Amino acid sequence: MTAALLNSWDTDDRRALRDLTRQFTTKHVLPDLATWERNGEVPRELHHTAATLGLLGASTPESVGGSGGNALDMLAILEEIILSGGSSGLISALFSHGIATPHIVSSGNDDLIDRFARPALEGRMIGALAITEPGGGSDVANISTTATRDGDSYVINGSKLYITSGTRADFVTTAVRTGDRGHAGISLIVVPTTTTGFTVSRRLEKMGWLCSDTAELFYDNVRVPAQNLIGEEGSGFGQIAQQFQGERLSLAFQAVATARRCLNLTTEWVRSRETFGRPLSTRQVVRHRIAELATEITAAEEFCRSVAVRWVDNGGMLAETAMAKNNAVKVCDHAVYEAVQLFGGLGCMRESEVERHYRDARVLGIGGGTTEIMNEIICKMIGL
């Protein structure tokens, strides 16, 4: 990493932020994480605690309720939570405002900011983002949930699937169709979950991210004020595409942090675990597997950090953010597999941290755009 990139990550402020995050995770997360996994959600008070410490709004301007900083600060927080023993599932639950509020903040709409973004950044409300529908996953341009203008209101009908924080959310930033077919007809509207006609159809049971509640949502003639529209009608697709890059970098950093955490746990394990009278770490086949994994993880970390710095400085980076996500997910998949394998029977037990990471890692190649969609973006950007 160049000196400039290194300086972007290794500053006094970011070291202090990492220390704060580590203390938060150790004190407020680790003692109860297993319970939250069994319960299928994290408590609302955790949002308030994280907000009080300035963690929820670390990449959002103070003028809208955040604590300042930029995306690098938030990425450092996410990375440190996992390195301290937290999980990507915990991050999904605690930071769902990170995909629900950026569109609101970017719009500059003071009314929406005051009613939804600011309370979410202060830990007083929980936000969710609803894009995916039962009939399609990553095909955002073909959303079928409709919002029809009726005087000073929009009337929304349709359903959404796989919505993070959907069962706990106070508001849902919802992708709807306000115009004709295709991407030009997509808009974003904020829907308070207390609105008549809005229901959580069912709570979904998942392979991983067990402490992150996920839901199917149903909109039956849901009437919301027209001022809940984010930006202009028809601008939703562009808003979604713009914010997707940040979400993909977040998932990339969670992937490499998970890989690094599993490497650290596995290295400690093979040093202490004895088979046939000597530690696993003395066996060449084990040592070389860990050496190769350490090399892959370090390379993925360097690439993710380089892309993140250049994205914050210059914007754009559509192909590189897709590459960073796919590469990080691939390395993470390798790391969690090796961790469980080298832990042996213990690696398959719920009492083992690597078991949780193995399950949680699987969603990283799906959320924020699947690996296949990332490859399509890369192909387009390189001229194929």
Image (tube, rainbow, N blue to C red):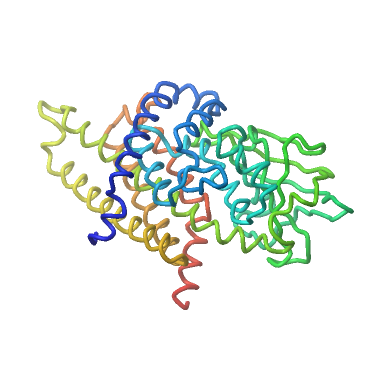
- Residue 311 lies, with reference to residue 23, above or below; the image says below
What residue do we see at 78% from left, 64% from top? Answer: 179
Question: Which residue appears at 66% of the width and 54% of the height?
Answer: 136
Please tell me which residue lies in front, 314 or 293.
Answer: 314
Of the pair 185 and 162, the residue shown nearer to us? 185
Residue 245, percent from left and from top? 49, 58
Q: Nearer the viewer, residue 292 or 298?
A: 298
Residue 233 falls left or right of residue 334: right
Residue 300 horizontal/vertical position (percent): 31, 55
Q: In this picture, is 13 found above or below 4?
A: above
Looking at the image, residue 281 sits to the left or right of residue 167; the answer is left
- Residue appearing at x 78%, y 54% in the figure: 146
Q: In the image, is residue 144 above or below residue 198?
A: below
| Quarter of image, res 15 | top left
Q: Is residue 80 left or right of residue 40?
A: left
Instruction: Give the residue furthest to the right.
Output: 151
Q: x and y percent of residue 291 in the render?
A: 18, 48
Q: Residue at the spot x=26%, y=40% of the render?
A: 263
Residue at the bottom extreme? 383
Q: Residue furthest front?
A: 63
Query: Which of the pair 1/215 is nearer the observer?
Result: 1
Residue 286 vs residue 32: left or right? left
Residue 366 placed where, x, y %?
Answer: 51, 50
Q: Is residue 101 above or below residue 379?
A: above
Q: How many marks?
A: 0
Q: Quadrant of the N terminus?
A: bottom left
